[in-house]
Amino acid sequence: MTENWAERAACKGLDPAIFYPLTDEEAGHAKAICAECPVKEPCLEHAIENREKNGVWGGETERERLRIVRRRRRLRQQQVTGIAS
Ligand code: SF4
């Protein structure tokens, strides 16, 4: 995390291992910290844009971020289809 928003991160100075749980079920501690974080949105967008493969970013696990990406892709396709028809 090298961008300005990272300076205000609630996870700054915490053990990074908290944010790299082995399973989604173990992500509760990280998610609780992210829920209170003032830079949750830019953190999530950073992870999506940079295709971060591991860890909890913006309160979302890798699997949850994949779902967000797929949902956005579907919405974009629907918008394109709606314009074309
Ligand atoms: S949303 Fe979570 S991972 Fe992202 S900066 Fe905040 S505390 Fe850290």
Image (cartoon, rainbow, N blue to C red):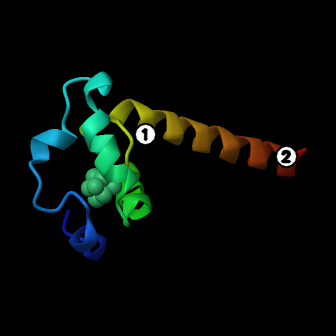
Q: Considering only vertical position in the picture, is 69 above or below 33?
A: above
Comparing marks 1 and 2, which lies closer to the viewer? 1
Label 1 amino acid? Arg
Label at residue 9: none
Q: Considering only vertical position in the picture, is 75 above or below 63?
A: below
Picture residue at 91% right of the left edge, 44% below the top? 85
Q: Which x, y percent locates residue 75?
A: 68, 43
Closer-to-camera residue (71/30): 30
Q: Is mark 2 within 8 Å of ligand 1?
A: no
**Which quadrant does ligand 1 occupy?**
bottom left
Instruction: Find the distance from the CA under tag 1 to the CA under tag 2.
Output: 26 Å
The residue at the far right in this view is: 85
Residue 66 appears in which quarter of the rendering?
top left
Closer-to-camera residue (28/43): 28
Q: Which residue is mark 1?
A: 65
Picture residue at 22% right of the left edge, 73% below the top? 7
Residue 54 appears in which quarter of the rendering?
top left
Q: Residues within 10 Å of mark 2 (few under 14, many from 20)?
A: few
Label 2 amino acid? Gly
Under tag 1, what secondary structure? helix
Picture residue at 26% right of the left edge, 65% below the top? 9
Asked whether, in this view, residue 5 is left or right of residue 19, the answer is: right
Under tag 2, what secondary structure? helix
Q: Which x, y percent locates residue 1?
A: 20, 62
Residue 60 appears in which quarter of the rendering?
top left
Closer-to-camera residue (42/84): 42
Picture residue at 29% right of the left edge, 50% below the top? 33
Q: Which x, y percent locates residue 36?
A: 37, 57
Q: Which residue is mark 2?
A: 82
Residue 6 appearing in the image: yes
Residue 47 appearing in the image: no
Q: Residues within 10 Å of mark 1 (few under 14, many from 20)?
A: many
